[in-house]
Image (cartoon, helix red, strand yellow):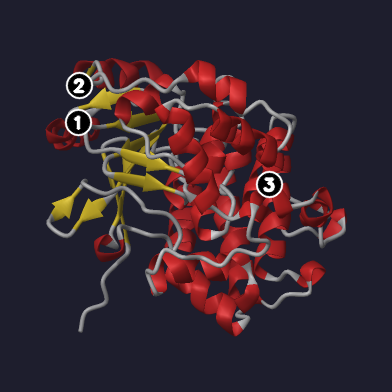
């Protein structure tokens, strides 16, 4: 049986083209894909013939349709149950790739069609041109599976306007194209049916500098369809409050539909990870990208190997969240602690203590 390549890469004209080719898993990232992407981007970074990079996903019927659903959470679940140390390499190399994308010296164009979640945001938010379509479903829903919005989420979510970053990190709402553009998480709207033509047009360019690329994309982009506006006033009011408990209690006292729905969403998520994510976003506002990724690498080590909690990997919030949502699908996670009001600052603080001295941190070389 022929092995299927999970990353397809080719150079046409002055553009390097990447297609994520794991459609049965919605292009969820595994370690081999992360390594292939990194190797490809490093080679093209140093190749003068490649002046720009374009990246897209694929679906079961062909290209586009799904960008990337994130990391491979079934792999995470198995690793947690078995105490598999391979997750150490996974997250170190994924965050190194996220840094490479964010700091890429050549134009990087992300076709964010279909599902763009978690790790998919990590390889697209650093793009110089982020294209969305009417099929875009964008989210950082990690708190629902007992995690936090990593892959640089503390950096790019915290730079959304006002306190939108806290709202996105804690509740993990799915954004459409117009909302993504309005909140600074996308740049241009392209009809899904025109993506193939734009992809082909990129291959015809003789010069791929930002000016020529912007002019080309302007001929394909249109105004995004109007969507329900995010209630910025309410978001900024509630999600600027001191703690998750204060936020949710204030929301529950507000009888508006939006407030009641938002409070109910928060009550479904891991109380511990909500508190961690709130701190992550607020710390991230003051950090460089490299500092944020090092912080998130610390957080992820503690989430997978929670020795400071006296828990095994199988007893983590992450193992329980994935079990409830993906494995058993009972949607009845048994969080520990079970209530938002039960989380104390002393439970959260150890997550932000690095398990490595600075000189041996796995991401020490990022600048």
Which is more foreground, mark 3 or mark 2? Answer: 3
* 302 left or right, relative to 218: right
Between 233 and 283, the one lying in front of the other is: 233
Q: Give the quadrant of the N terminus.
A: bottom left
The residue carrying mark 1 is 198
Quarter of image, res 55: top left
Earlier-in-chain disc, 2 versus 1? 1
Q: Is residue 79 above or below residue 271?
A: below
* x, y percent for residue 62: 14, 54
The image's mark for residue 220 is 2
The residue carrying mark 3 is 275
* x, y percent for residue 267: 54, 49
Q: Secondary structure at mark 1?
A: helix
Q: Residue at x 73, y 48 (%)?
A: 295
Earlier-in-chain disc, 1 versus 3? 1
Q: Is residue 152 above or below residue 87?
A: above
* x, y percent for residue 130: 38, 31
* x, y percent for residue 221: 23, 20
- CB under 8 Å between discs 3 and 2: no
Give neighbour class at mark 1: few <14, some 14-19, many 20+ (Cα, 10 Å): some
Q: Is residue 66 visible?
A: yes
Q: CA distance from mark 3 to mark 2?
A: 42 Å
Q: Is residue 7 above or below residue 129?
A: below
Q: Is residue 62 above or below residue 114?
A: below
């Amino acid at each position: 049986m022929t092995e299927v390549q999970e990353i397809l890469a080719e150079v046409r004209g002055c553009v390097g083209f990447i297609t994520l080719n794991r459609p049965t898993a919605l292009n969820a990232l595994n370690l081999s894909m992360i390594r292939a992407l990194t190797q490809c981007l490093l080679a093209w970074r140093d190749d003068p013939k490649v002046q720009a990079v374009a990246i897209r996903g694929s679906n079961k019927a062909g290209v586009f349709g799904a960008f990337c659903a994130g990391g491979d959470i079934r792999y995470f679940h198995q690793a947690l149950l078995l105490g598999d140390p391979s997750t150490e390499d996974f997250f170190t190399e994924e965050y190194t790739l996220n840094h490479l994308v964010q700091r890429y010296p050549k134009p990087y164009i992300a076709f964010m069609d279909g599902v763009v979640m978690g790790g998919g945001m990590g390889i697209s938010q650093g793009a110089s041109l982020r294209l969305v379509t009417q099929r875009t479903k964008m989210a950082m829903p990690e708190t629902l599976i007992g995690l936090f919005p990593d892959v640089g989420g503390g950096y790019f979510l915290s730079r959304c306007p006002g306190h939108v970053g806290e709202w996105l990190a804690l509740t993990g709402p799915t954004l459409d194209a117009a909302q993504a553009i309005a909140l600074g998480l996308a740049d241009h709207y392209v009809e899904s049916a025109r993506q193939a033509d734009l992809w082909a047009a990129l291959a015809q360019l003789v010069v791929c500098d930002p000016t020529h690329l912007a002019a080309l994309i302007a001929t394909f982009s249109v105004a995004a369809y109007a969507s329900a506006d995010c209630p910025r006033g309410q978001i900024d009011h509630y999600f600027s409050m001191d703690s998750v408990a204060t936020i949710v209690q204030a929301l529950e006292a507000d009888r508006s539909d939006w407030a009641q729905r938002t409070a109910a969403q928060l009550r479904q998520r891991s109380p511990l990870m909500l508190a961690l994510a709130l701190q992550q976003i607020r710390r991230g506002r003051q950090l460089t990208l490299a500092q944020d990724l090092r912080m998130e690498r610390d957080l992820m080590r503690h989430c997978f190997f929670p020795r400071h909690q006296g828990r095994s990997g199988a007893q983590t919030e992450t193992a329980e969240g994935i079990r409830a949502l993906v494995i058993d699908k009972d949607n009845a996670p048994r969080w520990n602690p079970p209530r938002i009001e039960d989380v104390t600052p002393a439970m959260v603080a150890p997550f932000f203590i690095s398990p490595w001295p600075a000189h041996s941190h796995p991401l020490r070389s990022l600048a």
